[in-house]
Amino acid sequence: MIQKINLFSFKGTKMSGHHSCCTCSYNNYIGGYFLHSLPISKFLMIRYIKDLALVEFIYKIYRLENEWERRYLLDMFFTPPIEYEPPVYRPPSEWRSLLIQLTIGCSNNKCTYCDMYRSKTYKVRPIQDIKADIAKCARAGMQPEKIFLCDGDALGAPMDILEETLDCIHEFFPEVRRIGVYATAENILEKTSEQLKTLAQKKLTMAYLGLESGDDKILHMVVKGNTAQDMIEASLKIKEQGFKLSTIAMLGIGGKKYSEQHIRATAEVLSQTNPEYFSFLTTFAIPGTPYHRMVERGLIEPLTSKELLIEMHDILEQSTFDLNKVIFRANHVSNAKPIGGILPQDKAQILETLKLWIKQTPAGVYPKMPASM
């Protein structure tokens, strides 16, 4: 089970910035899981590691002071004890979570900018297979504090599948404190308030929602499948039933033509929904996607690096949050400059930093798509 790597050429981490939920592939999650969910004594007793020299080397990695260096090196060593149907993605913030594949693919799978699940046909996995995966992880000695249910919008699975999965998780992992899931406005609204409350009581309490834009014209253009009002109603509904909401907006998704309305409408939706977590990522025209073809035909004119920073600045400036603590991040690989903080307390400082970056960024320069996307 040991994954061979070249220690001087670190590859294998797959970031996917074009998707609404800024995801990573499953190949880079398991080391982080081991690092944070096992005490050092048990870490060194993992049955897959049989070479003493390798154990000593991993112990040295474990003791590195730089957290990100530790995480990256450990991530390269472990593969999951269960079989996934690839590709499998998760939000970057779920890097410490055990991934359980509840559904395959995405029930919408029509968003023009996204190519993540186009190789898959959406389906809900048989409950016996899901339970078998959970049992295998338990037998492997895993003790996760967090679990993430894949694929694209696992909240859309039937209620009985969700409940049986959560019950099985608690049977094998009673110490789990939080379970997360991708969600769409549609599958939130399809569930009754009582059903959502039941799921939250079973510790499914983190939902990642791709808002992308608050403008209906843009949402229609990218075939999101929801309106801004759908997003608002779904966000408020799921929060009322005990979920925390992580909302993602996409910079540049409307191109130059719709930039101003994208700013205005997105800020309005954020102000009405007050997500506990909020992040930006940058839209790129991924080759092979309908969005890329629209760019090639001149139907969408991409934003320059300066214009993308202006969008970020203006959306934040126009957004008002009632919550005292909204965790904001724009540190995804798709974003040219990483920034983050706590809103509203850090808002003024973030806006000043963005103004400086806007001033320093030359006009007419376009961002380069990261190689890892």
Image (cartoon, rainbow, N blue to C red):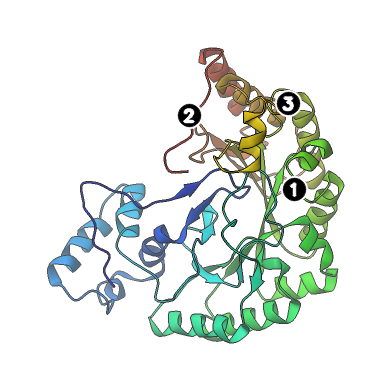
On residue 368, which mark appears? 2
Do labels 2 and 1 touch, CB within 8 Å? no
Q: Residues within 10 Å of mark 2 (few under 14, many from 20)?
A: few
According to the image, label 3 marks what residue?
Answer: 259
Residue 195: name its quadrant.
Answer: bottom right
Q: Is residue 298 left or right of residue 362?
A: right
Could you tell me residue 232's position as x and y percent?
83, 49
Q: Is residue 154 left or right of residue 185?
A: left
On residue 224, which mark appears? 1
Answer whether residue 252 is visible to the viewer in this image. no
Q: Is residue 51 left or right of residue 72?
A: left
Q: Amino acid at mark 2?
A: Lys
Q: Please identify the quadrant where the N terminus is shown.
A: bottom left
How many numbered callouts? 3
Q: Nearer the viewer, mark 2 or mark 3?
A: 2
SS at mark 2 in the image: loop
Could you tell me residue 206's position as x and y percent?
65, 61
